[in-house]
């Protein structure tokens, strides 16, 4: 139930409504702006890996190049500091830990909206640091399955410097240290594999088993958080 594949779900969606597309554009645009701002104003994705990932995510939702260019310009503008990254932590039904990454130009608005969603769905917002230690930052590159076996990907992933690999519905997820994601993704491509996308995530160190009822409640909570314009990604540690 981990929430890190949100971009891939949007990417492979066949029919996207205007409302969903607009929300996806807003999230992608803010991610680009923040990547430039927090990358010291570097606007070249070759020298700003976080920006490159943000642009990839924008392409995944079919954002026009001129919109991407405007988001980059905002990142180096004088008002760029108005949009910043924030993180919220909380608990959902069954004691599941929830980590929310957002970009916002109004912290009071965002924390109020996030708190309301938690409380509406049987959860609660927690103090900073309450659940972060239950997750570890890492990179993930998703390798396309077509015509490739798990063993073949595993061998090449380890050769490329990966730390772990998982077989999922979306593809083979190859995990790396955060600062090695760019190198590993490039190495996997050089070894003949197709990397559909890569991103930096927060991976649960351990998972919590939930009842079927609580599992549905957590899914509803995560969906409610993801629906907020300011929320970029939501992670939880449900099994």
Image (cartoon, grey):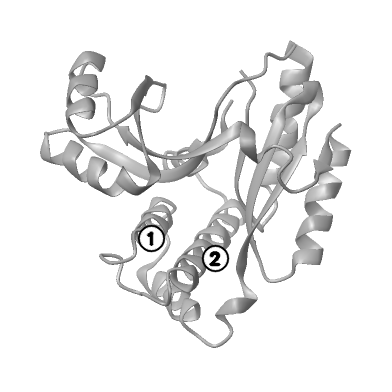
The answer to whether residue 153 is seen in the rendering is yes
For the point 76% across and 39% down, the residue is 90
Label 2 to label 1: alpha-carbon separation: 11 Å
Task: Look at the picture and state if 109 lies above or below 132.
Answer: below
Image position of 16 (left or right of 52): right
Say which mark, if any, is on residue 55. Answer: 1
Left/right placement of residue 151 relative to residue 60 reads left
Q: Residue at x 51, y 61 (%)?
A: 31
Evaluate whether residue 147 shows in this view: no
* Residue 170 screen position, x and y as percent: 40, 28
x 87%, y 39%: residue? 120
Quarter of the image that includes the C terminus: top right
Q: Secondary structure at mark 2?
A: helix
Q: Residue at x 64, y 22 (%)?
A: 238
Asked if the residue under mark 1 is in contact with the one under mark 2, i.e. CB atoms within 8 Å, the reply is no
Label 2, residues with CA under 10 Å away: few <14, some 14-19, many ≥20: many
Can you give x and y, in whole percent of width and height, for residue 25 in the image?
A: 52, 61
Q: Is residue 183 left or right of residue 228?
A: left
Figure quadrant of the N terminus:
top right
| Quarter of the image where one finds residue 143 | top left
Q: Which mark is residue 30?
A: 2
Looking at this rendering, what residue extends furthest in the bottom direction? 78
Find numbered disc 1 in the image and state the secondary structure of the residue it sits on: helix
Image location of residue 17, percent across then percent down: 57, 50
């Amino acid at each position: 139930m981990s929430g890190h594949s949100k971009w891939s779900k949007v990417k492979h969606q066949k029919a996207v409504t205007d409302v969903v597309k607009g929300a996806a554009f807003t999230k992608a645009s803010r991610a680009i702006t923040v990547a430039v701002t927090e990358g010291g104003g570097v606007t070249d994705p070759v020298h700003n890996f976080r920006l490159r990932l943000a642009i990839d995510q924008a392409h995944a939702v079919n954002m026009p190049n001129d919109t991407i260019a405007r988001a980059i310009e905002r990142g180096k503008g004088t008002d760029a500091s108005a949009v910043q990254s924030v993180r919220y932590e909380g608990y959902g039904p069954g004691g599941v830990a929830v980590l929310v990454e957002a970009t916002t130009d109004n912290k009071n608005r965002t924390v109020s909206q996030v708190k309301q969603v938690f409380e509406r769905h049987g959860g609660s917002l927690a103090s900073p640091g309450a659940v972060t230690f239950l997750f570890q930052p890492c990179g993930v590159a998703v390798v396309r399955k077509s015509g490739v076996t798990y063993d073949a990907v595993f061998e090449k992933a380890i050769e490329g410097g990966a730390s772990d690999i998982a077989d999922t519905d979306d593809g083979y997820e190859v995990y790396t240290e955060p600062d090695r994601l760019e190198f590993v993704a490039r190495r996997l491509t050089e070894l003949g594999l197709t990397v559909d996308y890569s991103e930096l995530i927060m991976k649960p160190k351990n998972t919590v088993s939930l009842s079927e009822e609580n599992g549905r409640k957590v899914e509803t909570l995560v969906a409610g958080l993801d629906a907020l314009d300011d929320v970029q990604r939501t992670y939880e540690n449900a099994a």
